[in-house]
Image (cartoon, rainbow, N blue to C red):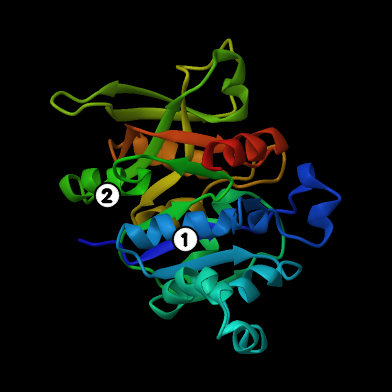
Amino acid sequence: MLLKHCIFPVAGFGTRFLPITKSVPKELLPIGSKPLIQFAVEEAFGAGINQFVFITNRHKNAIKNYFSPFKELEDHIKDSAVNLLLEGLNSLCLKSKFSFLYQEKMNGLGAAIQLANTLNIDSPFAVILPDDLCYSSEISVLEQMIQIHRKFPDKCIVALEEVEIESVSSYGIIHGNLINNYNNLYSIESLIEKPSIDIAPSNLAVIGRYILTPSIFKILKDVSMDKNNEIQITDALNEMAKNGQVLGLKFTGNRFDCGKPAGLIEANNFFL
């Protein structure tokens, strides 16, 4: 079954990049001349998805504008070589459907994903966090996950990366076992959100790529808020892992944490 939808949670304020993010969404910060969010959408589009759902807030309409026509600009440059710079973006927009949902309170990734349930999504879907810019010279991280999804269509799949043990408290961390005959594929028994080093079950961290089944919506409905008044997708996945419904793929490729200035600089150095 092909995935139809990809959800992009982009409602955060991007406080690490202040003051620029007071008016410019962090998802529009550039890697070269292309913004982070376009890399994310192109990854989903390249994996065969063309229905994109943005969970955003009412102060970030620049993202919606980015994927909308700008006739005055396009008329101004239509006879110049500069027009070629917009061809890729315009082609992507013409072949895709964009939906924008507004998250009134920033109360966690789980709450953002739950909001997409208002669209009555009834088949497995992808989630990409644009902060995590991923690159693979062969096939994209999401396409690697879709290959696994074809074999296990009834399970949720998360992307995994080994992180330094000192960094586990910044991630959702898994406890799981390698599955025989599948390179780098784990059957996940449990997940814990941002554990301290002494209780972390591994250094395998969930990064910003997910394939989720619609049953996640029902689980999220019953997840309690954490101490920061946030609903964590990790907690919902942990409930599903108890029933053997979550797999983790240690992907092939590079990840850049562009939610931090140093990561954005690293990505620019890599791609330029």
Which residue occupies the foreground of this view, 236 or 100? Answer: 100
Amino acid tagged 2: Ile
- Location of residue 193 with respect to 2 vertically, above or below: above
- The percent coordinates of residue 184 (x first, y second) are 27, 26
With 163 as the anchor, is 71 left or right in this view?
right
Which residue occupies the foreground of this view, 226 or 77? Answer: 77
With 238 as the anchor, is 99 left or right in this view?
right
- The percent coordinates of residue 24 (x first, y second) are 76, 60
Mark 2 and mark 1: span between their CA atoms?
A: 16 Å
Report the residue at 20% width, 25% height from top: 179
Report the residue at 41% width, 47% height from top: 210
Which residue occupies the foreground of this view, 149 or 26? Answer: 26
Q: Are marks 2 and 1 in contact (CB under 8 Å)?
A: no
Q: From this viewpoint, which residue is outermost toward the front? A: 80
10 Å neighbourhood of mark 2: few (<14), some, or many (≥20)? many
The reply to whether residue 218 is in sight is no
Viewport quadrant of the N terminus: bottom left
- Does label 2 or label 1 sit earlier along the sequence? 1
The reply to whether residue 37 is in sight is yes
Q: Which residue is mark 2?
A: 146
Q: From this viewpoint, which residue is outermost toward the top? A: 198
Report the residue at 22% width, 26% height from top: 183
Amino acid tagged 1: Val
User: Is disc 1 placed on a helix, strand or loop?
Assistant: helix
Q: Which residue is mark 1?
A: 41
Q: Quadrant of residue 96?
A: bottom left
Q: Quadrant of residue 78?
A: bottom right
